Image: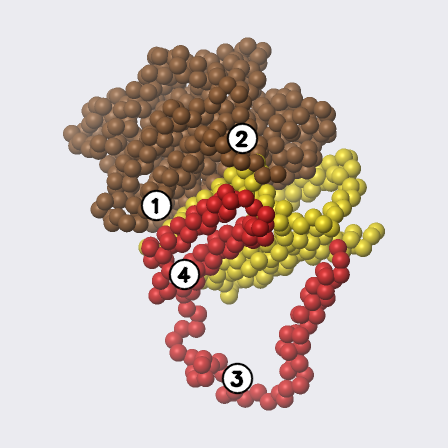
Amino acid sequence: MDNNWLYIGLFFLVAPLIPALAILAPLFLAPKKPNKIKSQIYECGIETYGETWIQFKVQYYIFALIFLVFDIETVFLYPWAVAYNSLPLFAVFEGVLFIIILLAGLVYVWRKGDLEWV
Amino acid sequence: MTGMDSLFLIFAVITLISAFLVVTTKNLFHAALWLIMTLFGVAAIYVLLNAFYLAVIQVIVYIGAIAILMIFAIMLTQRVMNPSGRIFNKNWIIAALLGAFMFIGLVIISMQTGASKTTLPQISGQLDTVSELGQALVSPNAYVIPFEVASVLLLAALIGAIFVSRKR
Amino acid sequence: MFGSINTSMILAILPEIMLFILAGFVFVFDLVWDDSQRRNLGWISAGGFSLIIMISLMLGTPGSDSGLVWGGMLRHDWLGFAFKMLFLFGATITALFAMDVEDLGKKGEFYLLLIFSTLGMTLMASSSNLIMLYLSIEATSLPLYILAGFFKDDDKSTEAGFKYFLFGAMASAIMLYGFSLLYGFSGTTDLDAIAGVIKAGGMNPVLLVGTLLMILVGFGFKISAVPFHFWAPDVYEGAPTVVAGFLSTASKAAGFTVLIRVLLTSYAPASDTWMMVLAIISTLTMTLGNTLALAQKNIKRLLAYSSIAHAGYILIGVVAISELGITGSIFYIIVYLITNLAAFGIVSVVGRITGSDEISAYDGLSRRSPWLGLAMLVVFLSLAGMPPFGGFIVKVLVLASAVKAKLFWLAFVGILNSIIGLYYYLIVLKHVYLYRSENEQVEIPVTRPYAIGLIVLTIGIILLGVVISPWFNVSTIAAKVLF
């Protein structure tokens, strides 16, 4: 274990401090003059319109699901790509087969209409 | 106690406390955030075990995709803002006893067989882990069959999960 | 460090490659066809599975050597090959039965998930490495979780899928922990090498038993042995009946394959340790399955408890740790697969027409549809162990192996449980043949693919009981591999 990981550890210690500072600083530095109109909830600069808690769109979930599967595919492809130069020819075909199988997944999701946003 | 041991202790404590908080927090969203903390702790332990690639995968896949998916799923349920329901049901004493029993069993096993005293084998710095892994993944007398089966499994999971979560 | 791929390696995974190509075909046709033509996917799947069986029997049978291929990941031998053909047969029949079920037979996803699950099972049958084993178990289980919850609008089906997934994931996690501890303490993931380490005394007995117990959690879940059986009644009741049939037969057979292989390859040097554990599990499974089946009013739950009991009988053969015992177990699994598939097939069609899965819905079935009543008679008598059906000869074999291994108490428990089992099977047959109902004249329409499947199965049950030697020889060759 060498010093590079210490840098990451240092990063983890310092990185939360900066947003924390950004959030906590106004507590001390900002003037406190609350006013009834200033404290109202607003939406895009005007008053709220309709219900505030709406049903979450399921499409977000489906996109995250598809992303997950392709992310795991990427994880398998990284080592193959790193070792690419020292691989014989059929190993390239094996990697391409892997990609084609997951490409079939993409085609399935596309043709069944799960990539539509609306 | 060497530096590595004390680092391991810190990360193990962080992981365990976060894991405990995942199952005991009332607010479901907070539970997901504590899970992210747990997964970071596990990634740190992977680094201590010299499994650098695994640590990176852990962060990218587990935290970057799976934990986000969980948060989306939580937001799909309607009561995310009202912590409701009891966390423990009436069997929690038996479950705690069983868990403690298993833990003590594992500790006894590891102490008896000296598993707690082994040291981490040193890997020579010339070993390029990721490249070796890549070659092993596509070599016919290593792991090529699990590699391809994993892709089929991913495809099956994709088709199945999309089928279940599709709108009617 | 790189090997090369030669023909024998390709022939070893010929069924898997062909299953993969079949999945490709079904996939393409599912995307190209529209709803009216999608039912033909069932013919393609069933025909494809049968073609794979025939081509594998012609080209891919294992030779006389024991054949570790693909870097020690897979083992090409008769044990794996016989089970592969069995799984493919089960999948053919399931595809045929499912073709005319509403919401099931017209969905391409059903056939795709069925093919993927069968692919996982064929890999399970020939795995020889812990990593391959775990991967193939997951590749089998994941499509089955979805298939159990396939009817998205039905509450029972989603509950079944959810329960199966939750318990299955938990059992899988514990099993994986056992695998990783086994790897850690023995230093290798290869099943034969682990046996070598245990034989040389390289592993502490406490660790041996600990890892074995954890691995048995996973395997016990798949074969629904006590105390890991509690998912079976709810899942079988809620899942679509055709899927419950596939689950209770092929998935359980796959679980038995890996159980037999791991226990008799890796843990073989320590067989005295686990024999008693497995004998107790077998006793509890048989007894619990049979006694709880007595109280059931829903036929799917009754069949679920009956299949739990049958898992107990099969375990008797495994406990005997002899060639006769494993032969008996393998033969029992073959007969059990055919019989239970037929049972769930009959339940599927009667449940669809009458709309109910209670036993009272079967009143007067023999008058409504004499052929279905006859099929039910054959199936239930075979399950009870009556000659001349297949169920009789395999029970004799399994109990004989227990006696030969001096486990007289186990054989006695088996006989006692068979007697209890006979009671509830005969109760159902009483409803079918003796009771009358007011819908007697309403016919039960049976479609062509379903009829083909059921006729093949019924003839198979009778054939297995009468013409014993081909199947017995296959089971013996498969069992010889392990000794």
Residue A30: percent from left, percent from top: 64, 86
Nearer the viewer's eye, disc 2 or disc 1? 2
User: What residue type is disc 1 on?
Assistant: Phe
Q: Nearer the viewer, residue C311 or C296?
A: C311
State which chain disc 2 sits on: C
**Callout in the foreground (3, 4):** 4
For residue A58, which numbered disc appears in the image? Answer: 4
State which chain is coloured brown: C
In the displayed orientation, state which residue is furthest to the left. C441
At x 20% / y 33%, what residue is drawn?
Answer: C445
According to the picture, the residue beneath numbered tag 1 turns out to be C27
Residue B31 visible to the viewer: no
For the residue labelled by badge 1, is the local secondary structure a helix, a strand or a loop? helix
Identified at 67% across, 25% down, the residue is C196
Q: Which residue is mark 2?
A: C69
Work out whether residue C295 or residue C330 is closer to the camera in this orientation and state it. C330
**Which residue occupies the foreground of this view, B147 or A18?**
B147
Image color mode: by chain
Which numbered disc, 3 or 2, marks the residue closer to the eye?
A: 2
Measure the C-alpha gap from mark 4 to mark 2: 45 Å
The chain identifier of the residue carrying mark 4 reads A
Q: CA distance from mark 3 to mark 2?
A: 72 Å
Q: Colour of chain B?
A: yellow
Q: Which residue is mark 3?
A: A39
Specify the amino acid type for callout 3. Answer: Ser
| Contact, mark 3 vs mark 4 (Cβ under 8 Å) | no
Callout 4–callout 2 Cβ contact below 8 Å:
no
- Examine the image and state in which quarter residue C82 appears: top left
Image quadrant assignment for residue C380: top left
Q: CA distance from mark 2 to mark 1?
A: 29 Å
Q: Residue at x 30, y 33 (%)?
A: C47
Per the model, the C-alpha gap separating discs 1 and 3 is 57 Å
